[in-house]
Image (spheres, rainbow, N blue to C red):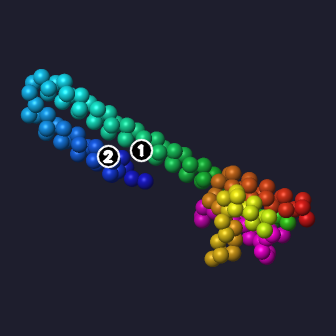
Amino acid sequence: MGLHNELPVYKASYDLLLEIFQFTKDFSKDFKYTVGESLKNETIKLLTLIFRANSRTVRQRIEYLEKLETIKSSEEEINGIRLVVSSEDNRVQIFFPGIPEEEVRKELKSNGFRWAPSIGAWMRNISNHSIYIAKQILNNLKTQV
C-alpha cells in the first residue's frame, strides 16, 4: 500500500490543482475571487479527502497486522487430522490422512478453505475466525465418527 502522494488519483488531483492556480491567474478580478477561489477550495478538499481515506486504510491495515502478531504458530491433531496454524506462512492448514468425504470438502470450501495440492492441505488465511472454523469442522467430524 503506497503513501497518499504516490496514488495516481492523488497525483492527478494535485496536477489539477496546479493547473487551476495557473489558469486562474489570468481571470479578471471578479472571477478570480469567486469562481477561481471556489475551484481551488474544492480541489483542496478533494486532496484532503484522498489523504484521509488513505490514512484510515493504512491505520486499519496496521491494526489488522498487529492482531495477526498475537496469533502464535501451533500444531494439533483432532481425530487423526492435523491442524497447523502457521503465523510465518499466514495460513491455517488442515492435513487429512486421505481424501475427505465430499460433504467435508464442501464444508471446507464454503468456509473459505482451498485445496493446495503443492503441500497436500486445505488452507485459508490466518485469523482467529479461521482457526475457530477449522476446529469446529474437525470437532464435528469427531462427533460424526
The residue where tag 2 is placed is 10
Q: Which residue is drawn at 28% across and 36% down?
A: 43
Q: Which residue type carries mark 1?
A: Asn
Q: How far apart are marks 1 and 2 (CA)?
A: 10 Å
Query: Circle 1 sits on which residue?
Result: 54
Within the magenta stretch, is there residue 94? yes
Disc 2 crowd, CA 10 A, few/some/many (<14, 14-19, 20+): some
Q: Is mark 2 on a helix, strand or loop?
A: helix
The residue shown at (47%, 45%) is: 57
Does the magenta segment cover residue 122?
A: no
Question: Please, is residue 28 above or below residue 65 in the view?
Answer: above
Q: Do the residues labelled 1 and 2 touch (CB within 8 Å)?
A: yes
Q: In this view, does 74 lie to the left or right of 40?
A: right
Q: Position of residue 16 (x, y in %)?
A: 23, 43
Q: In which quadrant of the rendered image does the C terminus lie?
A: bottom right
From the viewer's perspective, tell me whether residue 133 is left or right of residue 91: right
Q: What element carries label 1?
A: helix
Q: In which quarter of the image is residue 124?
A: bottom right
The answer to which of 72 and 99 lies nearer the viewer is 99
Residue 93 higher or lower than 135, as above or below: below
Residue found at x 19% / y 24%: 34
Compare residues 133 and 87 and report the one nearer the observer: 133
Position of 79 relative to 14 (above/below): below
- Specify start and end residues of the magenta stretch as a single range: 80-101
In the rendered structure, the answer to whether residue 26 lies left or right of residue 59 reads left
The location of residue 143, given as percent across then percent down, is 90, 59
Of discs 1 and 2, which sits in the foreground?
Answer: 2
